[in-house]
Structures are given as structure tokens and as C-alpha cells.
Image: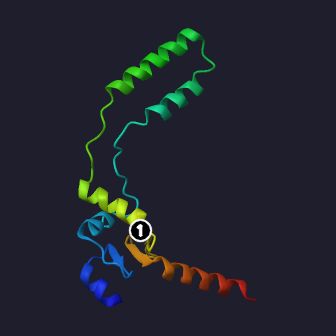
């Protein structure tokens, strides 16, 4: 069964050791590597305003109002970058995040992503801890 998943992906960037088959969109997403960042779908305006407010406390009222107006204008004119993944791939990301039966980890060597059953991962971690805790 393990060999079947390895052969089915035929991919050096994604190694599926889980019992769950990966969709083409999930494989495509994982091929982008684990440090891939999805472009934001919204501007975090509230967070930006809160940080600006905490930073301008030491300014006088006139300077603080000027900074507030400038930040407000910038936020209103801000354009989000174009999405760097398709809607299908974004759905695949959500599926992988929400699935409790698998875990995605970086491989020990290389830049591959390894997909494991969560139970298998926990068993391996427990074995490692038990080996190191016994005298």
C-alpha cells in the first residue's frame, strides 16, 4: 500500500505515506513547498490602524491627525495583489488544514513534503520519546 502511494505520485516533492489519497490540487499545492505563502484576500486594516494608533500616542494632536488621514488614504487606495493560487488549490489547502487524520511535514533531507497518518506520526514520536527517556 505504501509503495502504491509513492508510485502514484511519481513526484520528488510530495511523498504520501498516508492511507489517504491526495487530489491533484493537493499535490499541486504541496509541490509549491511548505514555505509557500498564499497572497492575502483582504487588507488587515484594523490591525494596521491599531498599530498606528499605538505608535502616534507620543505625537501632538495635529501630527497624529495628519498621520491618521495619511494612513486612511493609503488604506483606501490599497489594491490587493492578484491571487497566486487557483480557487481549486485554495480549497485543497483548506481540506488539508481541516483533515485531522493526516499531518504534512518537511522531509528530513531535501525540500519535499511528507504526508503521514496522524496516528503513525504520534506513534513514532512516542517511540522516540520512550527511547530517550529510558536509562
| Residue bearing mark 1 | 99
Question: Which of these two is toward me, 41 or 36?
Answer: 41
Number of numbered labels in the structure image: 1
One can see residue 10 in this view: no
Quadrant for the N terminus in the image: bottom left
Q: Quadrant of residue 33?
A: bottom left
Image-based side of 107 in relation to 1, left or right: right
Q: Is residue 2 left or right of residue 48?
A: left
**How far across and down, in percent of the image, does residue 110 sit?**
39, 73
Q: Which of 76 and 15 is in front in this view?
A: 76
Q: How would you rate the neighbour count of disc 1 (Cα within 10 Å): few for under 14, some for 14-19, many for 20 or more?
A: few
Q: Which residue is drawn at 66% across and 85% down?
A: 130
Q: Which type of secondary structure does the marked residue at label 1 adopt?
A: loop
At a point 26% along the width and 71% down the height, the residue shown is: 23
When the figure is inspected, residue 127 is found, relative to residue 62, above or below; the finding is below
* Quarter residue 109 falls in: bottom left
Compared across the picture, whether 10 is left or right of 40 comes to left
Name the residue furthest right.
135
Point out residue 124 in the picture as x, y percentages from the top left corner: 55, 83
Query: Is the image coloured rainbow, by chain, by secondary structure, or in one colour?
Result: rainbow
Confirm whether residue 37 shows in the render: yes
Image quarter of the C terminus: bottom right
Amino acid at each position: 500500500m505504501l509503495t502504491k502511494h509513492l508510485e502514484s505520485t511519481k513526484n520528488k516533492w510530495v511523498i504520501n505515506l498516508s492511507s489517504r489519497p491526495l487530489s491533484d490540487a493537493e499535490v499541486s499545492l504541496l509541490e509549491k513547498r511548505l514555505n509557500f505563502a498564499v497572497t492575502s484576500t483582504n487588507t488587515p486594516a484594523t490591525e494596521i490602524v491599531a498599530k498606528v494608533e499605538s505608535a502616534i500616542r507620543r505625537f501632538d494632536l495635529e501630527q497624529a491627525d495628519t498621520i491618521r488621514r495619511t494612513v486612511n488614504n493609503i488604506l483606501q487606495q490599497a489594491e490587493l495583489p492578484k491571487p497566486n493560487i487557483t480557487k481549486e488549490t485554495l480549497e485543497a489547502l483548506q481540506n488539508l488544514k481541516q483533515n485531522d487524520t493526516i499531518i504534512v511535514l518537511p522531509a528530513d533531507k531535501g525540500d519535499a513534503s511528507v504526508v503521514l497518518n496522524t496516528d503513525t506520526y504520534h506513534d513514532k514520536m512516542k517511540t522516540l520519546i520512550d527511547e530517550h527517556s529510558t536509562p
